[in-house]
Amino acid sequence: MTRLLECALGETRIAVAPELGGALAWLRWRGHDILRPLDPAGEQRANLCGSYPLIPWSNRIANGCFTFNKVKHRVKRNFGDHPHSLHGNGWQTAWQVLHATELEIVLELHSPASESWPWPYRAEQRFRLFPDRLRIELTLFNNAEENVPVGLGFHPFFADAEHSEIRFVSSRVWLNDENSLPSKETDVPEPWCYHTFRPPIPGSVDNCFTGWQSPAEVRWPQKHIRVEIDSAATNAILFIPPRERNVVAIEPVTHINNAINLLPANDSEHAMKTLNPGASLTHWMELRMVSDE
């Protein structure tokens, strides 16, 4: 059985699964699942939890190949028969517990250079509870003796999409090609426009949006509650899977999909960042629960 560390403050409760990729197993408020909970009787994977960390890159690296500082690299394909490398390696690695109290859990990961990423790094993930919100901070420390590319993100799955409405505002979106890779940045088409609350359309979108204006919101009118998704990021993935999965993912990320092959590092707020030896990068997300009664 997966070990879970639980915290509670007021009406907010969380459970963290350190050995399951440092994932957030569930988040509940007033007894309602805000995020899709890990099924204790089902398959135990980070991407079946409520949320999981994306480190040292987010989303796809095309065919697991890229060039950095004129050196070609190949990273392990890590998602079954999927042709691309997805979401980094942190979500498929056990994390250690550095610190755990009733209000805060801090996890640590030491990742050596390997076939899943050519440079060593250390990571910390901090879960901090407040009466009406959860803040998660993800930090990568460069342990390599050279500059390295870095990207971070969070992959929360919001529960009960069937009875939800979402508000998600951004100025642009990357269209995907036949290989599910970004090919063109354009204005947001009307079917993907959620500038005002409306029900998510199942199976309609899995794209990276730029010029994202946080917070995004998910609300459940029948329960009279909503959650605000806040971050300093200006890029976010909106992923609405087919109806049977009954979730919506709104993922704050520091770079666009396949950025390492599309944009020079540090080129813009859409690109991966370059870290000097010993330097660090921190990314955060806050989930704030609100009553609509």
Image (cartoon, grey):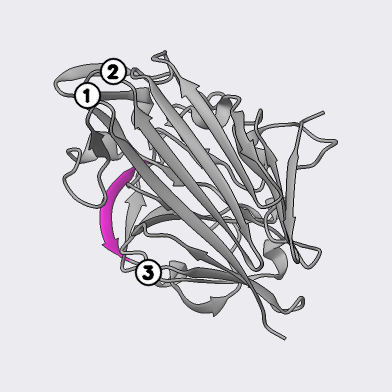
Up/down of 143 relative to 41, above or below: above
The residue located at (68%, 45%) in the rendering is 101
| x then y, percent, for residue 160 | 72, 61
Q: Which amino acid does label 1 sit on?
A: Thr
Which is the main secondary structure of the residues drawn in magenta?
strand
The residue located at (72%, 86%) in the rendering is 293
Judging from the image, what secondary structure is the residue with disc 1 in?
strand
The residues tagged by marks 2 and 3 sit, at their Cα atoms, a distance apart of: 34 Å
Q: Residue at the bottom extreme?
A: 293
Nearest the viewer among 279 and 147 is: 279
Q: Can residue 83 be seen in this view?
A: yes
Label count reads 3
Up/down of 219 relative to 44, above or below: below
The residues tagged by marks 1 and 2 sit, at their Cα atoms, a distance apart of: 6 Å
Q: Earlier in the sequence, mark 2 or mark 3?
A: 2
Q: What residue type is labelled 3?
A: Gln
Image position of 16 (left or right of 98): right
| x then y, percent, for residue 84 | 42, 29
Q: Which of marks 1 and 3 is nearer the N terminus?
A: 1
- Callout 1–callout 3 Cβ contact below 8 Å: no
- Callout 1–callout 2 Cβ contact below 8 Å: yes
Circle 2 is placed at which residue position? 73
* Magenta highlight range: 181-187
- Callout 2–callout 3 Cβ contact below 8 Å: no
The residue located at (63%, 35%) in the rendering is 46
Circle 1 is placed at which residue position? 67
The residues tagged by marks 1 and 3 sit, at their Cα atoms, a distance apart of: 31 Å
Circle 3 is placed at which residue position? 213
Q: Nearer the viewer, mark 1 or mark 3?
A: 3
Q: Which amino acid does label 2 sit on?
A: His
- Local packing at callout 2 (Cα closer than 10 Å; few below 14, some 14-19, many 20+) is few
